[in-house]
Image (tube, rainbow, N blue to C red):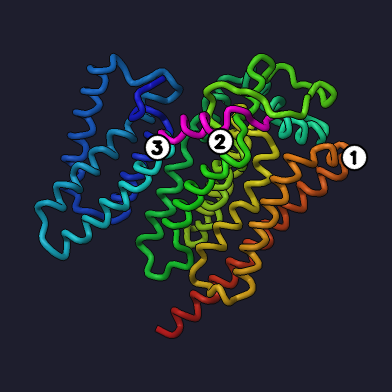
Amino acid sequence: MHPFELNPTFAFTLLGTFFIYIWTRPPRWTLVPILIIAVCTRILCIRMNGGLGDYYGVSWISWGAFLGIGVLTVLAGLVMWSRAPAKKSYLQTFYSGSVFPMLAMVDGYSVPFNIWLRPKTYDAFLLAFDGSLGFQASFILGQFLLHNPTVRNLTTVVYYALPLTVCMVYASDRMRIQKPVAILALFLSLTLLGFAQYGVYPAVGPRYAFSGMYPQTSPSLAEITLQPMAIGNSPRNCMPSLHLGGALLVWWNSRFWPRWGRILALLFALATALATMALGEHYLADLIVAFPFAVLFQAAWTTSVPWSDSVRRNSFYFGLVVTILWMLLLRFGVHFFEVSRIIPWTLLIATIVWSIVVERKLAAVALSSRAQTVGQT
């Protein structure tokens, strides 16, 4: 286990802090102390720990942590020594750059509590649903990575990088005058309530639940016993997939980016979906539920559309109801999916397509509301 500050996901989070700062177009001279602090803390970390870790890309991914530390240190100094109104601006940027690293630490330290709270998981039910589709996507993709180490390495980078893309969306949103969506509240609530949701439907992923078989051999439906499983100290962070949910929200909220940025956001969401399964962290079922779950939060924080507008209310209730229905079916109605492959495939396609359609309608109303506001100013 690497020191927490060297965790690749946390390193990408702190790199996001660096991007949040850079997005404000700060004085160029501040980059000098940031780089000096980054280099010094990196050298100190290597001396104290004997290295930076052994995961793929550690030599460059870890720079994100040190750059983020440098930014927060310099911002703290600027807050102390500056005068208004610059002082207020630096303080706001310090808070903005601190919030996601702090959230990551809170989530990280909450994992043992979740394991203690739910010692048994529902992985067998999720595996059974995936099997009712006629194949085990996580196992097939995992086998592909097993024979393609280069692709596996790149896949792990995609899996780690989500916090960076979230910070980039937030950084770009801070610079806009018109804000159709409360971006910070959106991602904070998704993360906090998502982790609370893990206590409702605990699951660890095939890599941990079926460690003796994954990814070489996927159990058949007849071999799966539908009952809670006693799993060791693996995080209960599968259902729904906050990784895909977060990537979807990044894509949906990149509408103000250039076209190439939008395309990259979409490709990142697709790559994240594949990465979560290929690395054995999620089942396909987790990804399906992530769609309505993401719609729920997108509707909750699209504040440019009043709650009295039926489009926003209907989007919110759609996300809430469909998420709950999937949870109930995946816990108590798995045998229903095994009647015919038509049933799970129909529900899968309908959920994904309907979620995208609902979100697009909500976005259209939000953009029209923004256009009217701009026209009145």
**Residue bearing the label numbered 2:** 237
Give the extent of the magenta segment: 109-123
Q: Is residue 22 magenta?
A: no
Residue type pointed to by label 1: Ser
207 sits to left or right of 233: right
Q: Is residue 115 magenta?
A: yes
Residue 67 in view, yes or no: yes
Instruction: Measure how far apart labels 1 and 3 are at the Cα level.
Output: 43 Å
Q: Quadrant of residue 278?
A: top right
Residue shown at the point (24%, 18%) measured from the top left:
48
Please say if 177 is above or below 61: below
Residue shown at the point (63%, 71%) measured from the top left:
311
**Residue bearing the label numbered 1:** 340
Query: Which residue is more in the foreground, 101 or 34?
Result: 101
Label 3: element kind: helix
Residue 264 in view, yes or no: no
Query: Which residue is more in the foreground, 145 or 6?
Result: 6
User: Which disc number belongs to residue 12?
Assistant: 3
Please say if 188 is above or below 144: below
Instruction: Measure how far apart labels 2 and 1 are at the Cα level.
Output: 29 Å
